[in-house]
């Protein structure tokens, strides 16, 4: 889908990069954000319109124009099992549904898969409320779009890494990781490749349905932290066993380490046509001496 005007809802680290990529392509883009401090700068940089809203409280006061497409990158709230933010946003769009809606979700909706390879046909089985909120958002968006004839695309995104998005602080504090022999499979995507996927999801006419947004080369969280350390020229983190990890690691980290899966990106690459710049951690995180 090309031409027309677009709305970017949520302009954080990923959204900011998507905004820059769309501006480089000379596309008309509006923004919905709760950050009033960015309004003047973004409008001066060529953003068509700015809609300010805290979706925990309500939708924008201005009615929506008719957008060709909408990216929704706003995360769900930090608690509960549903996503009222998305529902408020969809209510705001009701007078003028777009032609296409692209939602960022998470591969966490699959839950623990015992290290198996997973494609988009796998039935979701989220193990955390964080992932349940994302799955709730998926269902709400699909139902809303189907009832109004709106095309929808959902990207289930793996762990995002890239410049400014690395666990440098954790490494400098020498926080431990699970020893390699016990570390489960995990998956990642470079932020530049995610931006590519978001653009393809919106602008490719054939884009439809679910896509795993991942590099297709799973490794382990331990391997990832080691590669980040090498990339930054820092000492590798100490490794501990699972029993000690239960005592020392945060609940959030333990929840990631309780799930193991290897994600296929065949649909992303073969059907959506995304050509990954960083298909491996070796490409995305060259050692400091080679960077």
Image (cartoon, grey):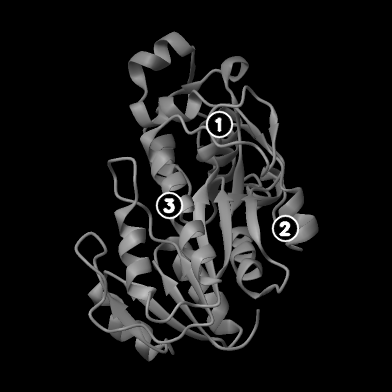
Residue marked by disc 2? 276
Instruction: Say above or below: 252 vs 291.
Output: above
Expressed as whole percent of the image width and height from the top left, the position of residue 32 reads 35, 74
Tag 2 secondary structure: loop
CB under 8 Å between callouts 2 and 3? no
Packing grade of label 3 (10 A; few <14, some 14-19, many >=20) is: many
Residue marked by disc 1? 221
Q: Which mark is residue 137?
A: 3
Expressed as whole percent of the image width and height from the top left, the position of residue 79 reads 27, 41
Expressed as whole percent of the image width and height from the top left, the position of residue 224 reads 58, 36
Residue at left offset 60%, top offset 20%: 180
Instruction: Say above or below: 97 vs 80.
Output: below
Report the residue that reaches farthest toward the top: 243
Residue at left offset 68%, top offset 48%: 215
Report the residue that reaches farthest toward the front: 147
Expressed as whole percent of the image width and height from the top left, the position of residue 244 reads 40, 11
Q: Earlier in the sequence, mark 3 or mark 1?
A: 3
Tag 3 secondary structure: helix
CB under 8 Å between callouts 3 and 1? no
CB under 8 Å between callouts 2 and 1? no
Quadrant of the frame with the N terminus: bottom right
The front one of 41 and 109 is 109
Q: Nearer the viewer, mark 3 or mark 1?
A: 3
Q: Nearer the viewer, mark 2 or mark 3?
A: 3
**Mark pair 3, 1: CA separation:** 27 Å
Instruction: Say above or below: 213 vs 45.
Output: above
Q: Earlier in the sequence, mark 2 or mark 3?
A: 3
**Mark pair 2, 3: CA separation:** 27 Å
Q: Please state the total of marks drawn on the protein image.
A: 3
The quarter of the picture where residue 192 lies is bottom right
Packing grade of label 1 (10 A; few <14, some 14-19, many >=20) is: many
């Amino acid at each position: 889908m090309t031409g027309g005007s677009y709305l970017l809802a949520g302009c954080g680290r990923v959204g900011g990069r998507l905004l820059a990529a769309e501006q480089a392509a000379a596309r008309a883009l509006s923004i919905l954000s709760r950050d009033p401090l960015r309004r003047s700068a973004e409008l001066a940089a060529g953003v068509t319109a700015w809609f300010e809203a805290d979706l925990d409280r309500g939708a924008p006061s201005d009615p929506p124009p008719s957008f060709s497409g909408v990216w929704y990158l706003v995360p769900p709230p930090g608690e509960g099992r549903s996503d009222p933010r998305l529902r408020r946003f969809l209510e705001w769009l009701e007078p003028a549904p777009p032609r296409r809606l692209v939602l960022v979700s998470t591969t966490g909706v699959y839950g623990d898969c015992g290290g198996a390879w997973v494609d988009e046909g796998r039935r979701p089985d989220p193990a955390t409320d964080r992932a349940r909120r994302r799955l709730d958002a998926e269902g709400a968006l699909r139902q809303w779009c189907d009832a109004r004839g709106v095309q929808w695309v959902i990207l289930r995104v793996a762990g995002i890494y890239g410049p400014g998005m690395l666990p440098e602080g954790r490494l400098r504090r020498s926080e431990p990781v699970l020893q390699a022999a016990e570390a489960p499979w995990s998956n990642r995507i470079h932020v530049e490749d995610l931006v590519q996927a978001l653009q393809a999801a919106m602008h490719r006419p054939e884009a439809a349905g679910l896509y795993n947004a991942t590099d297709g080369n799973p490794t382990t969280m331990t391997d990832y932290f080691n590669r980040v350390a090498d990339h930054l020229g820092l000492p590798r983190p100490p490794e501990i066993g699972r029993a000690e990890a239960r005592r020392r690691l945060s609940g959030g980290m333990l929840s990631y380490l309780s799930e193991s899966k290897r994600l296929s990106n065949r649909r992303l690459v073969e059907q959506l046509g995304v050509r990954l710049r960083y298909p491996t951690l070796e490409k995305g995180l060259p050692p400091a001496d080679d960077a």
